[in-house]
Image: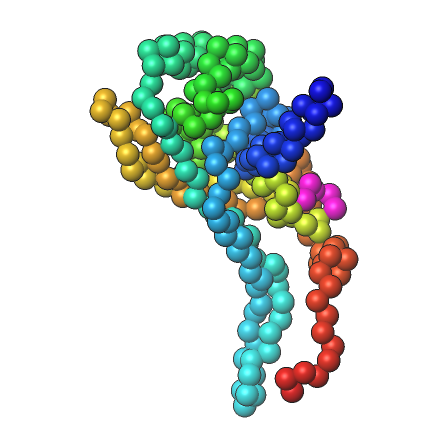
Amino acid sequence: MAAVNSLLSAFRGGLNPKPARAYIIPLDIHHGDEPILAERRSFQYFPQSISDQRATNYQAKVIPGLSHPLYQWTSSGARTISFQAVFSRDRSYTKAENDSIEAGVTSLSNLGGDARGSLAAQADFRNRNNGVNGSGSESRNVDIPSAIAWLRSFLDPEYSSDGHSTYGTSPARPRPPRKMILGFPNVRINWGVPELKKDEVYSIMTQCDVSYEGFFANGAPRFARVDLSFAEIIQIGGGIRVHDALNKRRVAYAGYGLNDQSNKGT
């Protein structure tokens, strides 16, 4: 009977697999751009569509009397990745949820701006408030304002006096917004870049536009769309990781076999 139950469980799991989630891993700009895995956050839903735009730059050389200009390649252009994130709630907040959110914000604020020092408080917050953080059966009831604050944090600078925490003895100065790793499981969005994971892109956020489209009776948001844009970066950890066309051709030839050399249609 145990074997039958295990087989049935595996069968049901195959019919209802755990959904993939796009995610963001912040990079610690004060410690060599190393990923801060404890601060990884996933989107509530996988994007319905992803726009991945890339261009290259040529300089036109106009020759008098020539039918066309001559083109000289100068550099590859920017790569922009954009998609719409959706956040929703099926039900209004309970008092316990509201209290837990407020307690979590107070706990983190008391630790100042040191991201590493706040990890214990973050873990405690998650343990006390699994529902609002989007785990388990409550993943359909995330706290929308918190999700938007998380995304918008990648647009603002950090003001630091010692390169590590917000508060110190010398005047604070602005630090750039955080870089990040943007991940799309199984999309292979960076297929053909050996130094990087195929499902991840090192990037910076360039746009975060929010549209609130539904509210509960007390005014709390119940549905929001967020239009996001990111620019891929290659300056990571004090170095530069270039993309080589040869590596991309290798994976292309290995996986894409449509090579019709006949003269059909001519």
Comparing 78 with 16, the one in front is 16
Say above or below: 23 vs 47: above
Q: Position of residue 43 (x, y in %)?
A: 49, 33
Residue depicted at 38% across the width and 14% down the height: 97
Q: Is residue 74 visible?
A: yes
The range drawn in magenta is: 194-198
Residue sitting farthest toward the front: 1
Q: Is residue 34 visible?
A: no
Comparing 265 with 2, the one in front is 2
Q: Position of residue 179 (x, y in %)?
A: 55, 35
Residue depicted at 63% across the width and 36% down the height: 14
Residue sitting farthest toward the left: 217
Q: Provide the major secondary structure of the magenta segment.
A: loop
Where on the picture, by quarter, is residue 263? Answer: bottom right
The colour scheme used to paint the residues is: rainbow
Q: Is residue 22 left or right of residue 90?
A: right
Residue depicted at 50% across the width and 30% down the height: 175
